[in-house]
Image (tube, rainbow, N blue to C red):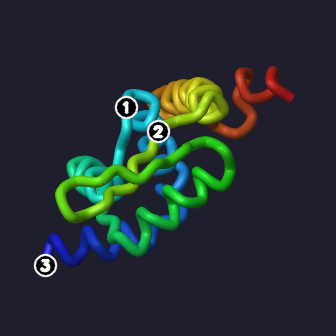
Amino acid sequence: MISRLMQSENKTYQDLYSGLIRIHILHHACEGEVFGFWMIEELGRHGYKLSPGTIYPLLHSLEMRGLLVSKEKREGSRYRRLYRATAAGRKALVAAREKVRELFGELTEHHHDHRRGSSRSRSRL
């Protein structure tokens, strides 16, 4: 029952998580080569449930945007597509990290700091 609720919740919030998933992919692709099935497992360790029908279009879209580059590598009788970050992908990850830090800071601040009309809110206007 709990597992079904978590899956339902993941689908409900998938549009919110999609940017985080892309950042996660870029993070690992900056560290080294990644492939689809490994990313499914890695993201699964963080609570994301992705299928091949989701991860491969994500990887392909990041490649089409110039953030990843791929190559085929033969492993036995199979070929595997490996992805790694481009210079543009590494630059995008640096920018995303800063945005994530900023958001994390806001999410973890006390709620009363963000009430409408507080002096802090007004000073930003």
Residue 66 as seen in the image, left or right of residue 84: right
The answer to whether residue 112 of the structure is visible from this angle is no
Instruction: Report x, y in % for residue 8.
Output: 32, 76
The answer to whether residue 123 of the structure is visible from this angle is yes
Point out the tag, 2 or 1, that comes first from the N-terminus: 1
Q: Are marks 2 and 1 in contact (CB under 8 Å)?
A: yes
Q: Which residue corresponds to the image point at 49% horizontal and 48% vertical from the top-left?
A: 70
Quarter of the image where one finds residue 28: top left
Residue 121 as seen in the image, left or right of residue 55: right
* 64 up-or-down from 5: above or below: above
Point out the tag, 2 or 3, that comes first from the N-terminus: 3
The residue labelled by disc 1 is 32
- Helix, strand or loop at mark 1: loop
Instruction: Report x, y in % for residue 72.
Output: 41, 53
The residue labelled by disc 2 is 84
Q: Which residue corresponds to the image point at 63% horizontal and 37% vertical from the top-left?
A: 115
- Helix, strand or loop at mark 3: loop
Marks 2 and 1 sit apart, C-alpha to C-alpha, by 6 Å
Mark 1 is on which residue type? Gly
Q: Which residue corresponds to the image point at 66% horizontal and 45% vertical from the top-left?
A: 66
- Quarter of the image with the N terminus is bottom left
* 75 up-or-down from 123: above or below: below
Mark 2 is on which residue type? Arg
Instruction: Report x, y in % for residue 103.
Output: 56, 33
The residue labelled by disc 3 is 1
Of discs 1 and 3, which sits in the foreground? 1
Quarter of the image where one finds residue 40: bottom left
